[in-house]
Image (cartoon, rainbow, N blue to C red):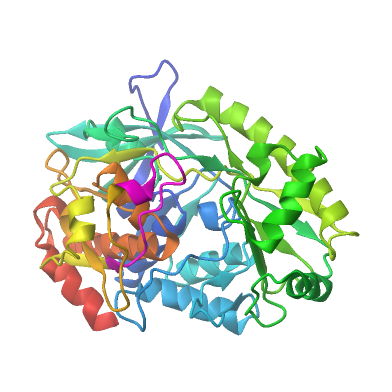
Amino acid sequence: MENCTYTYSKPCNVMEKTYDVIVIGGGTAGSAAAIASAMGGEDTLIIERNSCLGGLASVGQVTPMMHNGIDGRSGRSYINEIIKKKMALEGYGADDHYGNDGWFNPEMIKYALEEIFTEYKGTILYNTELLDTVVENNKIKGVVVHNKSGLSLIRGRVFIDCTGDADAAFASGVTCFTGDELLHNNQAMSLRFMAGNIDILKLKAFLKEIGEADILEYPLVEIASVWEAKTPLNKVFQKGLKDKVIEYPDGKYFQAFSVPGMPGVMSFNCPEIPDIYDTLDTAAVSRGLITGRRMIKRLHSFLKAYIPGFENSCLISSADMPGIRESRRIRGKYILSEKDFSERAKFADGVARTAYPVDIHGLIDEKKLGIKLMERGEYFEIPYRCLITDAIENLLVAGRCISSTFIAQSSVRIQPTCSALGEAAGIAASYCVRNNRKPNELDGKIVRDIMTEKN
């Protein structure tokens, strides 16, 4: 490698190789984007800050996938179906009687994603952080990264930002929004955890005894409670609050699921951490992580003392990645809005579909918005134009940071939709490399047609 002097005081290595497609971030959207690109035959690199793929699905322990509300294969990600099928065949995935086949093992999805991507000759650079982008004439020439090898400049033809925070887009000068349009507050963050040595049968018997709905067949189980819902399980939480075993924020949002391939283990979609309104403020998020771990200890102590089945349980892990629901969103060629949700909008360049509700986690009262929930068979689409900008010609953005309003983003941020958006970006990148096209000038109908053929 030759040496160059970039804008940093230390020398920056220039990688000799130029990749066809570089995906920044190997989470749900990034893995799908990279796999789709590699399937198309392009020389594809994933730059990932963690030591595994999966992002929130693996490191963040966000399991199972929320269902996008659409029956059948319509609107599903072809790549995501491959991943779920592999997980199910190996005993690490499952489906339930609600029709959600997105139950998966967060540890084993690391292996599945890595195996699928490398099967198509993809390259991964782990433990590597994006520092900056090199932009010339509205085109990204390369990305500056940092790892134990030092600073490096890696060049590519097409770039896909799947960082979740639109880091590459922001560094490249793309206009971004964050938070709600009035105060710019972000949605609540969570910190997930897993507990083991749980007697699932005893837990299910207890739920039945107190009158809690439980229609899932063993070994699947879900438990949930919020203060506003006066359910049988909530009464148990009320007692824990009265006894000062837990605090009010601990029970604001409680949800847990069993994990395929991990007998006696449950993954907790909580606690939801209060008073963190800027998820781009590292100091604030750090305080949130400290608060979250304290909440986890209280919750687990409560479960052991008040919920049969948890008496001999132990904490296995807390997630190494906080559950950030929303931060930056790019300003793309089209800004998806709640109007599109309400009108069940369809687009000629629609590359993803969802019927998932507006889900803002308390920052705004969804009921006051007057947005009607989707009925069975209804959905709205996300156009390809939400993935591209006028500012940078060879950049695509996929995942929760696409171009949308704050409210619309809360409906499209779930994993199946992010996977579909990543797949669309990967297909577009591959097509543009092979046909010498600019991603931000590509007719998204081409991407839609390719995705339709695969499904």
In the image, residue 69 sits, relative to residue 156, either above or below, namely below
Residue 53 in sight here: no
Tell me residue 64's x, y (percent): 56, 66
Tell me residue 452's x, y (percent): 23, 79
Q: Is residue 445 left or right of residue 123?
A: left
In the image, residue 1 sits, relative to residue 7, either above or below, namely below
Q: Which residues are magenta?
A: 353-368
Q: Is residue 210 left or right of residue 271?
A: right
Name the residue at the right extreme: 312
Q: What secondary structure predominates along the stretch shown in magenta? A: loop
Quadrant location of the N terminus in the rendered image: top left
Quadrant location of the C terminus in the rendered image: bottom left
Pick the residue in front: 432 or 324.
324
Tell me residue 366's x, y (percent): 37, 49
For image coordinates 54% across by 35% down, the residue present is 149
For image coordinates 70% across by 74% down, the residue present is 261
Name the residue at the top extreme: 9
Q: Is residue 251 left or right of residue 68?
A: right
Q: Is residue 315 left or right of residue 232?
A: right
For image coordinates 13% across by 65% down, the residue present is 349
Quarter-of-image position of residue 259: bottom right
In the image, residue 86 sits, relative to residue 19, either above or below, namely below
In this rendering, the count of numbered labels is 0
Q: Examine the structure image and report whether residue 312 is included in the region drawn in magenta.
A: no
Tell me residue 412's x, y (percent): 34, 57
In the image, residue 86 sits, relative to residue 327, either above or below, namely below
Quarter-of-image position of residue 92: bottom right
